[in-house]
Image (cartoon, grey):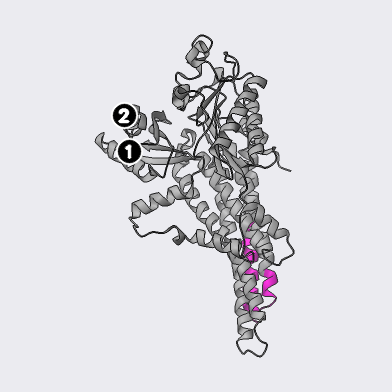
Amino acid sequence: MTTPLVECVPNFSEGRRPEVIQAISDSIAAVNDVYVLDHHMDSDHNRTVITYVGSPEGVEEAAFHSIAKAAELINLDEHEGAHPRIGATDVVPFIPISGVTMQDCVEIARRVGQRVGEELNIPMYLYEEAAQRPDRTRLEVIRKGEYETLKEIIATDPFRAPDYGPKKLGPAGATVIGAREFLVAYNVYLTTDDVEIAKKIAKTIRNSSGGLRYVKGLGLLVDGMAQVSMNLTNFRKTPLALVVETIRREAQRYGVGIRHSELVGLIPQDALVDAAVWYTQMDQFEPDQILEKKLYAAQQVDRGTLNVQPSTFIDSLAEGNPTPGGGSAAAYAGAMGAGLVSMVARLTLGKKKYAEVESQMQAILDESEALRADLTTTVARDAAAFDGIMAAFKLAKDDPAREQAIQDATLHAAKVPLEVAGKSLRVMELALQAVSVGNLNAITDAGTGAAMAQAALSGAGYNVCINILGLNDKDIADNLVNEVQAIKAKAAELQKQIRVQLTERGGLALA
C-alpha cells in the first residue's frame, strides 16, 4: 500500500533574516509526520522558499502554523525586495506526491484557507486547481499590483475580494493558497545589467505572451545583473533544456549571453536527466542506465547492502547486525560535514558583499560536492568491505587461497576508512576557508561541518586500527597507523584555527 504523501512549498517574504526563517522552519518541523527537506533564501528577492513533505494531516497543520508564525515575524509595510508579493506568507501550494489525489490537495488548500482567514484574520485567495473562480487560476493575476495596490483597493474592488478572511490588509498582507503539480523554480542570469533585455526575453518565453507552454517568466534586476526568473509548471511537456536554449538564442539577439543559472528549492531527478539526455543527444538512453537507480533498486531488494536514506540508515545502524557499522557511520558523518560546507558556499555565492571571494567559494563548492558524493558512496563501500572479510573467512579451511583472501580483504577493509579519514580532513580544510571568508551568517554551519568531519575521521581511524589487527604484515599495519595519526594531528590543528576564526570573526564565546 502506498503511503499518503503531500509536498508543500510555501514562499515567505523574508530572505535577509535567518533567525526569522529558522523560526518558521521550526514551526513546520515541530508537527508530527512532517519533514523539512530544503529552504532557499534569496536576499535580493528578500524571499525564502521552504520545501517540506509529510502525511496529508501533518502537512495541513504545518501550513497553518507556518503562516501564523510568518504573520507574527514579517511586516509587509517594512518589506522591500525584487520579487512580486502580497503577503508575509505569499503563496502556499500543495502538491500530491503519492497515495493522494489532486482533489485531496484541493480540499487541504481550502480548509487551510478558511481556517487562516477565520482564525488569523488574513485575507486568503485560492489559485490553480483550488481556485473557486476561473479568473483566479493564475497566481500573477491575484498578485497584480502587489501588497501596496491590494491594500488600497481590497475593500472597494469586488474583483479583489478574498475567498476567505477580511477585506482589509494588515502588516501580514494576504496569502494565496492552492494545489498544483510539481513546479520547477529556475532563474537565468544574463551577461548584462540591462533589465529591459531580461524583460524582453521573459516576454518571449512565457506562455501568457505567446511563448513556451508551461513557462511563467519575469525580467528582473538582481544584484546588478539582469535575470530571467521563471516557473516551469510542467517540465515533461516543456523540458528545461528547451527553455535554456530558447533564452540563449534570444539573448544572442541582443549581444549578450547566459552568465549562470540557479535553482530555487528542489527539482525532480528526471528533469535533470532529461536535460542531460537532450544536450548529449543520447537517443538510446534508458532510465535504468543510471548507476544510482540501480544501486537504490538493489538496496531495496537486499537489506544487507544498505539504504542510505537518513531515517532508514539510522534505523539500520541501530539493528543488531554488524553492517552498517562504525565505518559507514563515519563516512556518513563526513558526507554531512561536506554538505554543510556546500551550504555555506551556496549562501555566499552571488552576494554582492562577498564578490571578492566569489571564485574561491565556487571552487570550495565544487570540491565539497565531489567529497560529499564520494563519502556518501563510501557508506555502502565500508559495509561491503566488512562483508568481504566475512566471505573470506567462510572459505573452506583447506582452501590454499583462503589465508591470502583474508589478508587482502582485511587490508581493503582498513584502507576504506583510511580514505574516509583523508577526505574528511579535506572537508575540514574547506570548512576553515568557509569560516574565514564565507557568509558571516552561516559560519557556525561551516564550523559544525568541520566538527562532523573531525568526528568522521576519528571514527574512521578507529576502524582502521581494528582492521589492521588481522594483518600479518606488521610494516603495512604500522604505516597505516602512522597515516591515521598524521591525519588526526592535522585535524586537531585545523580545529584550533577554526575556533579562532569563529571567535574573532563571528564573535562567538566558545566553551
Where in the figure is residue 40, as x and y percent of width and height?
Answer: 53, 37
Secondary element at tag 2: helix
Q: CA distance from mark 1 to mark 2?
A: 10 Å
Where on the picture, by quarter, is residue 413? bottom right
Helix or strand or loop: what does disc 1 sit on? helix
**Is 266 positioned to the left or the right of 386 in the image?**
left
Q: Is residue 63 magenta?
A: no
How many other residues sit within 10 Å of disc 1, few (<14), some (14-19) or many (≥20)?
Answer: many
For residue 50, side relative to residue 316 (left or right) = left
On screen, 94 above or below 85? below
> Is residue 325 shown above or below 471?
above
Say which residue label 1 marks. Answer: 247
Q: Of callouts 1 and 2, which one flags the residue occurring earlier in the amino acid sequence?
A: 2
Rendering quarter of residue 312: bottom right
Q: Residue at x 56, y 32 (%)?
A: 106
Q: Residue at x 55, y 51 (%)?
A: 430
Q: Which residues are magenta?
A: 465-491
Q: Residue furthest top?
A: 156
Circle 2 residue? 200
Q: Which is the main secondary structure of the residues drawn in magenta?
A: helix
